[in-house]
Amino acid sequence: MISIDARFDAVATVYLAEMRGLVNGRSSMVDHARQQERLGVNTVQSVYLLAGGDAADVYGRNYLIEQQRIIHASSISLAAAVAGGLSVAGLLHRLWLWIHSLAAVYQRGMIVARPLVQFQWILGNTEEHCTTCLMFNTQIKSGRAWLALAEQGLAPQGKRLECGGWMCDCHLRMVG
């Protein structure tokens, strides 16, 4: 599992366990989608706030609304996939993707809350890294600079990374 720091790791572990419980329970598809969406929305907001993000400012509020929209669409897609016969292994793979999405939200909260603090790009445990991640590896930038890159999809788990960010284990670490 992607590891950022003790706080994120604890929340991600609990979230993964709760999601596995939903998968293993195999409730009705509609119930599963609703439970997953509720859990996802609550967890996204929790990790953003835990990292230091502010849900009260316009930027934070808009970012969280966008994340909730993504979770809603993902929940509908997941329910349809389960109804279509997606295996338990396939469901568990989807959960790993969601953990990586949570990591991106957590890191966004970190850099938004600390615009002047320096952060370093750290490669994850992936066997092979994309050229974008290798290019950013060990680079140190301010939270403000990483936020500008994140807005372009060029932060860990970003959509514009060569790897697409789906299973990117890279993360930002505060320097100093």
Image: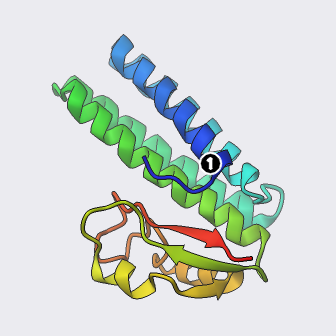
Classify mark 1: residues with Cα within 10 Å, few (<14), some (14-19) or many (20+): many
Rendered residue at 37%/65% (across/down): 165
Q: Is residue 73 above or below residue 138?
A: above
Q: Quadrant of the C terminus?
A: bottom right
Look at the image and tell me whether residue 27 can be seen.
Answer: no
* Front one among 69 and 99: 99
Name the amino acid type tagged 1. Answer: Phe
Number of callouts in the render?
1
Rendered residue at 63%/87% (across/down): 141
Which element type, helix, strand or loop, lies under badge 1? helix
Task: Name the image quarter holding residue 79.
Answer: top left
User: Can you give x and y, in whole percent of width and height, for residue 75 in the image?
Assistant: 41, 36
User: Can you give x and y, in whole percent of width and height, for residue 78 in the image?
Assistant: 32, 35
User: Can you give x and y, in whole percent of width and height, for residue 88 in the image?
Assistant: 24, 25
Q: Is residue 100 above or below residue 86?
A: below
Rendered residue at 53%/87% (across/down): 139
Coloration mode: rainbow
Q: Is residue 55 left or right of residue 140?
A: right
Q: Is residue 63 left or right of residue 137?
A: right
Rendered residue at 39%/70% (across/down): 159
Task: Name the image quarter holding residue 86.
Answer: top left
Q: Which residue is mark 1?
A: 8
Q: Is residue 14 left or right of residue 159?
A: right
User: Can you give x and y, in whole percent of width and height, for residue 76 in the image?
Assistant: 37, 36
Look at the image and tell me whether residue 169 can be seen.
Answer: yes
* Front one among 3 and 96: 3
* Residue positioned most to the front: 176
